[in-house]
Image: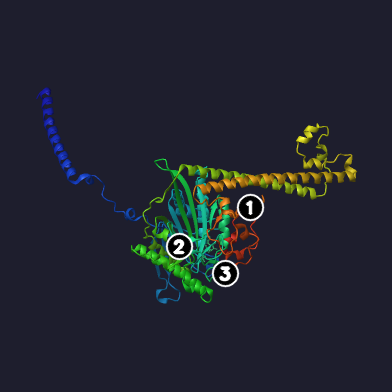
């Protein structure tokens, strides 16, 4: 066959094949169209999600932390019965008892899987970043978060939550992170941070920032709240740390057989962040996120602790609230309609964290010692069960409040005025410092002139006008001319001059003080007026919180930032508690608190005192 003929035949065959394919495609498309019309859009949509978390909310994240073997445990010849596998699983080994001759040398073990598990070498930062840092970020987006530490006495709950000065725990790291994140986001003071710290002891709720009468729980729009609980407006990490330290000292502790300074109460630190954002319609919206950090009391069995005295009642109450917590967890896991939150104060307070729309994290603390096998097994079982709890689907702050523009402007103005007030107070403090220095110099005996002072004697030939303009220097007054050096009367004259200058400066300071006080008062009035105009209580302002008093112009303690709606029986300010009024051995209503461990006053408010926190690594 010639090439030309062949070349003609091939396209003819291919064309018919091509047409057949085209026909097939057409019929398939028609079929598809028919199917689409019959089943509608759903046919093309992906199948409904089988992930229950999308329907029922997010799962509680459960982590386990193993603490190092304690000295006592090592001395008692205990063995390590816990192993962390792949940073997730916990392998618990039950060693046969030496007296159990039948099972001698036989081992039993069990695997538990968690979201992550931390070996005894894990740092506080490791624990914080894995468990809590995401919650802090979510709080800044208006979502609530809770972290609670569970475990037997001495398992390391307080260490994990509060930590030590050298290794601060989750509470401190979370607040540090929160302030850093706020600083990065807003430079205009848009975020307000309020803080409260309470304990539940023997079924009573106590304010740890302002210890006094027990608080009553009531339910309002925001959930269960402790009426009269101090809300502290915080501005920096340092002051929060000092507050935590102070609050922790007021916490009820008792030596138990299992732990020398065992926390006998459940402690709840709540940090509320309020801020304003613009929505799509450019309205200003108020948002709020709440972070709850909870250090539960030891979950040990009654026998492990001292059962003879007050401890029996205390232990019963701890067990009661933890039992109530277990019942709630069981009811939540089983999907029951009624969750028995009302069975204890603790569960009432944790209602939001367990069943509400909240990101919840649980850190179960365990000891690695085989002597604590029973407690460890209980904790792991409990934690394993808690994994199944699902909190409500997160609905980033349902109650967003639109804020009218005028109110925002007012709020901004209030913030600016507050800032200005702070600066004025600082200036006042500096002036005060100056006069103190002057007074110290005037009461000191005149020092003989040094070579340098002799050389630096100011020229006497300066024109009178210049002399008047320059402020008389104190140092200049102590300079002696060589001729006057040996003359006693010259010294006396100099002292007199000095005293006159001090007096003049004191008068000047008095005038400055009066000026500043007047300015501060005026600004306070403006702030108060603006707050009242907005129809809202501005919790943070000094004027709205401080009782009316004569303005002496003296520096005030930061106690004005405590906001207690209900007066407590014996209300003390922050500084009162940490200094003069603080008894060296504290028993509050018969309770022992950590403050009995403190012998020296705090050197600097920003320093975390060891006794206020978990004991040192070496002590265990
Ligand atoms: N991860 C850890 N690294 C080093 N030391 C730790 C660790 N965890 C706990 N400890 C130490 O173990 C001891 C007991 O810890 P902690 O007081 O935190 O226990 P607890 O669970 O809070 O006990 P309680 O319920 O009785 O208050 C402390 O001395 C603490 O410093």
Does the residue tagged 2 have its C-beta within 8 Å of any atom of ligand 1? no
Q: Are marks 3 and 2 in contact (CB under 8 Å)?
A: no
Q: Is residue 366 above or below residue 562?
A: below
Q: Which mark is residue 218?
A: 2
Q: Where residue 417 sits in the image (x, y, percent)?
A: 57, 44
Q: Which residue is mark 1?
A: 556
Q: Is residue 73 above or below residue 238?
A: below
| Comes first in the chain, label 3 or label 2 | 2
Where does the C terminus fall, quadrant-wise?
A: bottom right
Q: Which mark is residue 589?
A: 3
**Marks 1, 3: nearer the viewer:** 1
Q: Where residue 466 sits in the image (x, y, percent)?
A: 77, 33
Which structural element holds mark 3?
A: loop
Which structural element holds mark 2?
A: strand
- Give left or right: position of 350 versus 433: left
Point 67% across, 51% down: residue: 552
Residue at the farthest left position: 1
Quick one: 358 or 214, which is closer to the camera? 214
Which structural element holds mark 1?
A: loop
User: Which corner quadrant of the image does residue 26 belong to?
Assistant: top left
| Comes first in the chain, label 1 or label 2 | 2
Q: Where residue 464 sits in the image (x, y, percent)?
A: 81, 33
Structural crowding at the residue carrying mark 3, measured as other residues with C-alpha within 10 Å and reported as few (<14), some (14–19) or many (≥20) = few
Point 54% across, 45% down: residue: 414
Disc 1/disc 2 C-alpha distance (Å): 33 Å
Where does the N terminus fall, quadrant-wise?
A: top left
Residue 68 is at least partly visible in this image: no
- Give left or right: position of 194 versus 441: left
Structural crowding at the residue carrying mark 2, measured as other residues with C-alpha within 10 Å and reported as few (<14), some (14–19) or many (≥20) = few
């Amino acid at each position: 066959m010639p090439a030309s003929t062949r070349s003609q035949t091939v396209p003819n065959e291919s064309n018919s094949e091509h047409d057949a394919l085209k026909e097939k495609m057409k019929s398939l498309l028609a079929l598809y169209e028919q199917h689409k019309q019959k089943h509608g859009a759903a046919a093309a949509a992906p199948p409904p999600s089988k992930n229950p978390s999308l329907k029922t909310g997010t799962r509680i994240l459960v982590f386990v932390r193993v603490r190092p073997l304690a000295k006592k445990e090592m001395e008692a010849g205990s063995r390590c019965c816990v192993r962390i596998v792949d940073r997730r699983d916990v392998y618990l080994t039950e060693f046969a008892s030496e007296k159990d001759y039948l099972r001698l040398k036989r081992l039993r073990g069990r695997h538990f899987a968690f979201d992550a598990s931390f070996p005894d070498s894990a740092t506080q930062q490791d624990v914080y970043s894995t468990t809590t840092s995401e919650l802090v970020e979510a709080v800044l987006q208006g979502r609530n978060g809770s972290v609670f530490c569970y475990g037997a006495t001495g398992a390391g709950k307080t260490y994990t939550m509060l930590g030590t000065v050298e290794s601060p725990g989750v509470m401190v790291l979370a607040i540090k992170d929160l302030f850093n994140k706020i600083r990065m986001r807003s430079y205009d003071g848009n975020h307000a941070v309020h803080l409260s710290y309470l304990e539940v002891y023997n079924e009573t709720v106590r304010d740890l920032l302002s210890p006094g009468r027990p608080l009553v729980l009531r339910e309002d729009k925001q959930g269960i709240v402790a009426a009269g609980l101090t809300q502290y407006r915080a501005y920096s990490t340092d002051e929060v740390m000092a507050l935590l330290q102070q609050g922790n000292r007021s916490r009820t502790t008792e030596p138990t057989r299992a732990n020398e300074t065992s926390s006998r109460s459940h402690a709840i630190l709540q940090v509320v962040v309020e801020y304003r954002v613009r929505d799509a319609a450019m309205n200003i919206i108020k948002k709020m996120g709440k972070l709850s950090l909870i250090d539960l009391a030891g979950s040990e069995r009654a026998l492990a602790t001292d059962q003879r005295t007050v401890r029996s009642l205390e232990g019963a109450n701890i067990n009661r609230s933890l039992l109530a917590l277990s019942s709630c967890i069981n009811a939540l896991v089983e999907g029951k309609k009624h969750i028995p939150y009302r069975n204890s104060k603790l569960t009432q307070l944790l209602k939001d964290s367990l069943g509400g729309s909240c990101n919840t994290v649980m850190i179960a603390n365990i000891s690695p010692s085989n002597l604590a096998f029973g407690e460890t097994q209980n904790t792991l079982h409990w934690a394993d069960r808690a994994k199944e709890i699902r909190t409500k689907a997160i609905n980033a702050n349902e109650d967003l409040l639109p804020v009218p523009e005028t109110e925002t402007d007012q709020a901004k103005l209030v913030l600016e005025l507050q800032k200005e007030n702070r600066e004025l107070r600082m200036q006042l403090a500096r002036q005060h410092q100056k006069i103190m220095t002057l007074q110290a110099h005037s009461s000191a005996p005149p020092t003989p002139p040094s070579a340098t002072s002799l050389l630096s004697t100011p020229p006497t030939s300066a024109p009178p006008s210049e002399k008047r303009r320059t402020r008389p220097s104190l140092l200049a007054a102590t300079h002696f001319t060589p001729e006057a050096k040996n003359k006693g009367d010259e010294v006396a004259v100099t002292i007199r001059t000095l005293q006159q200058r001090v007096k003049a400066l004191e008068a000047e300071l008095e005038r400055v003080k009066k000026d500043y006080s007047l300015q501060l008062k005026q600004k306070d009035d403006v702030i108060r007026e603006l707050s009242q105009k907005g129809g809202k209580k501005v919790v943070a302002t000094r004027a709205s919180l401080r009782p009316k008093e004569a303005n002496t112009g003296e520096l005030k303690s930061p106690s004005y930032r405590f906001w207690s709606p209900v007066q407590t029986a014996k209300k003390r300010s922050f500084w009162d508690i940490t200094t003069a009024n603080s008894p060296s051995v504290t028993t509050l209503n018969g309770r022992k608190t950590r403050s009995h461990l403190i012998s020296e006053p705090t050197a600097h408010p920003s320093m975390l005192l060891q006794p206020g926190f978990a004991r040192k690594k070496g002590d265990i």
